[in-house]
């Protein structure tokens, strides 16, 4: 190998751009509060995982549109694994004492998790279209292009129902039929995704209550945990939940 080739060889640090990555944690408190680094790292890493989730949701949408049940199942299973990671890392912020957060919270300005464009894009891609969601988007000004693009596409539920129609299977037959199929496992994986998302929301509510209390407003002018609490019951796949009622409604009492 020539000297020039050695100089341009890819290393662990250069491939991951570690010099740039590790320089992006910039505490604003003066003097720097020792707990602010953890706060920044958790939120920055969440955004990285959101990027990966959006990437796989795009892949899931493509697979569903192509009516590829097996590939769709693989995609949503990975999304679920990523959601578990995002949810689990919130636990590290439970070690942040309220008095410590109060010492640097004022330096956050008007920044708020509700301003996360990628998180809003995930919600939109997953199927949120209700009035509460649209109002939350409009409160932060012009809707970002990545979110707007998601709003123009079919929801995951619409794409899944179209896949069932393509396979000549109804939701009722999927659950009342002779036994589990790939489509059944895909439906259950989609529901697991919604549960993982709801779990993330719930843990976020509990974390906010634990650190700043349930009645404290958010830094971005939101209602804090009261706002987050309203979002827990939002549904991506209402038809997949409703079909269970139809199942038990058809059973005869013994």
Image (cartoon, helix red, strand yellow):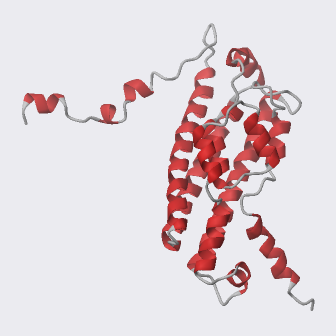
> Which quarter of the image is occupied by the N terminus?
top left
Instruction: Report if residue 132 is visible in the image.
Output: yes
At a point 81% along the width and 47% down the height, the residue shown is 131
From what the image shows, is residue 43 above or below residue 105?
below
**Residue 2's image quarter?**
top left
> Residue 229: x percent and y percent?
83, 43
Residue lying at the far right of the rendered structure: 253
At a point 52% along the width and 22% down the height, the residue shown is 25
Classify residue 152 as left or right of residue 254.
left
Classify residue 9 as left or right of residue 164.
left
At a point 45% along the width and 21% down the height, the residue shown is 23
From what the image shows, is residue 208 above or below residue 229?
above
From what the image shows, is residue 189 above or below residue 121?
below
> Which quarter of the image is occupied by the C terminus?
bottom right
Residue lying at the far left of the rendered structure: 2
Q: Which residue occupies the foreground of this view, 40 or 245?
A: 245
At a point 58% along the width and 23% down the height, the residue shown is 37
Residue lying at the far top of the rendered structure: 31
Classify residue 18 as left or right of residue 151.
left
> Residue 164: x percent and y percent?
62, 77
Instruction: Report if residue 88 is visible in the image.
Output: no
Number of numbered tags placed on the structure image: 0
> Residue 29: x percent and y percent?
64, 12
> Residue 32: x percent and y percent?
60, 12
**Residue 222's image quarter?**
top right
């Amino acid at each position: 190998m020539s000297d020039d080739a050695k100089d341009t060889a890819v290393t662990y640090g250069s491939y991951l751009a570690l010099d740039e990555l590790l320089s992006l944690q910039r505490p604003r408190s003066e003097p720097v509060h020792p707990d602010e680094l953890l706060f920044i790292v958790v939120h920055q890493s969440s955004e990285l995982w959101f990027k990966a989730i959006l990437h796989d949701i795009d892949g899931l949408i493509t697979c569903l549109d192509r009516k590829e049940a097996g590939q769709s199942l693989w995609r949503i299973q990975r999304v679920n694994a990523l959601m578990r990671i995002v949810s689990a890392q919130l636990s590290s912020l439970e070690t942040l004492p309220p008095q410590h957060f109060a010492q640097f919270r004022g330096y956050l300005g008007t920044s708020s998790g509700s301003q996360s464009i990628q998180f809003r894009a995930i919600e939109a891609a997953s199927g949120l279209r209700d009035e509460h969601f649209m109002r939350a988007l409009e409160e932060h000004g012009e809707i970002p292009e990545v979110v707007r693009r998601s709003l123009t596409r079919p929801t995951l539920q619409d794409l899944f129902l179209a896949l069932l129609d393509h396979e000549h299977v109804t939701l009722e037959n999927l659950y009342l039929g002779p036994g589990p199929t790939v489509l059944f496992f895909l439906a259950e994986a989609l529901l697991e995704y919604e549960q993982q998302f709801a779990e993330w929301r719930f843990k976020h509510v509990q974390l906010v209550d634990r650190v700043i209390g349930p009645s404290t407003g958010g830094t971005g002018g939101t209602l804090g945990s009261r706002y987050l609490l309203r979002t827990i019951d939002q549904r991506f796949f209402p038809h997949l939940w409703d079909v269970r009622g139809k199942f038990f409604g058809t059973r005869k009492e013994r």
